[in-house]
């Protein structure tokens, strides 16, 4: 096949064209202002190769990640901080937001202490199933979104004067969930991040303790992983967020 024929064949290859367009879009995403301070160990090709052709949008997780990042950047520039809490239930999460808390922390401690229909209550050792914290987060998100619906229904019935007296509350689920040590290797971390995003959560907190010897955060005698392994954990989480198109 000569060069002219090869070019003609390539132009008709719609799958190849779509692939190249997606690579360009991912490259643009990597170069955006949001990731100005981020160094990745993977390439746009790696991300595209791990995406299916049928992709979900994950709108709420995207919105939450973008809003949380902007808020934290503003706090950083102004040398301020957000003092938050780890609610024990979805009702507590809603109450905290109504009281003015901007970002919620979904702790593994609360998940362990509460137990479940298949697990005894216990200490903060992350010895629950990988999907336990994402499921708890999903209930928080559902409660926050429901409260947003209730609020809008109530405000539509108010007069303009009444609405000015009672500011609307932003119930966007700005949640930082406890990812513990990632629950294992790279595959486990990617699976964990995926479950959080599917639960409409756009962030994760991964610590530097070694799986299997994890202890509560306030206790001594922690066994930490190497810097290289921690970088690998963070990059793996970043990879999964990239695959799902969420800022993280």
Image: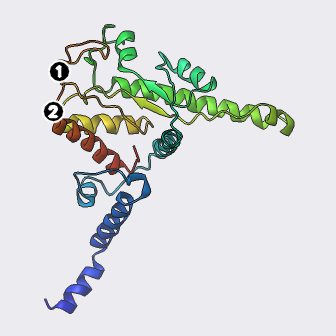
Q: Look at the image and tell me in which quarter the C terminus lies.
A: top left
Q: Position of residue 201 (x, y in %)?
A: 43, 36
Residue 123 as seen in the image, left or right of residue 230: right
The residue that mark 1 highlights is 223
Pick the front one: 246 or 68: 68
Q: Position of residue 196 (x, y in %)?
A: 38, 35
Q: Position of residue 99 (x, y in %)?
A: 63, 23
Q: Quadrant of residue 123?
A: top left
Pick the front one: 66 or 38: 38
Q: Position of residue 107 (x, y in %)?
A: 39, 21
Please report the residue visible at 35 percent of the width from the left and 35 percent of the height from the top: 195
Q: Residues within 10 Å of mark 1 (few under 14, many from 20)?
A: some
Residue 156 as seen in the image, left or right of residue 236: right
Q: Look at the image and tell me in which quarter the N terminus lies.
A: bottom left
Q: How many numbered markers are drawn?
A: 2
Q: Quadrant of residue 98?
A: top right
Pick the front one: 196 or 37: 37
Mark 1 to mark 2 CA distance (whole Å): 10 Å
Please report the residue visible at 28 percent of the width from the left and 28 percent of the height from the top: 207
In the displayed structure, 191 sits above or below 134; it is below
Of helix, strand and loop, which one carries label 1? loop
The residue that mark 2 highlights is 226
């Amino acid at each position: 096949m000569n060069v002219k024929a090869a070019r003609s064949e390539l132009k008709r290859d719609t799958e190849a064209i779509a692939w190249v367009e997606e690579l360009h879009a991912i490259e643009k995403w990597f170069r955006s202002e949001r990731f100005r301070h981020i160094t990745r160990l993977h390439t746009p090709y790696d991300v595209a190769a791990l995406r299916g052709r049928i992709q979900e949008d994950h709108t709420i997780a995207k919105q939450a990640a973008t809003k949380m990042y902007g808020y934290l950047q503003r706090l950083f520039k102004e040398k301020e901080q957000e003092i938050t809490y780890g609610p024990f239930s979805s009702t507590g999460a809603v109450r905290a937001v109504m009281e003015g808390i901007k970002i919620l922390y979904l702790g593994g401690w609360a998940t362990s202490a509460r137990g479940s229909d298949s697990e005894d209550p216990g200490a903060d050792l992350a010895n629950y199933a990988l999907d336990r914290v994402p499921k708890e987060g999903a209930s928080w998100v559902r409660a926050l979104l429901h409260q947003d619906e209730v609020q809008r229904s109530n405000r539509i019935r108010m007069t303009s004067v009444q609405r000015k007296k009672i500011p609307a509350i932003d119930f966007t689920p700005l949640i930082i969930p406890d990812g513990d040590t990632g629950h294992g290797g790279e595959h486990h971390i990617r699976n964990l991040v995926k479950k959080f995003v599917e639960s409409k959560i756009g962030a994760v907190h991964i610590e530097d303790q070694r799986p299997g010897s994890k202890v509560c955060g306030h206790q001594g005698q922690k066994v930490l992983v190497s810097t290289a392994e921690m970088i690998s954990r963070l990059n793996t989480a970043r990879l999964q967020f990239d695959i799902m198109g969420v800022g993280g």
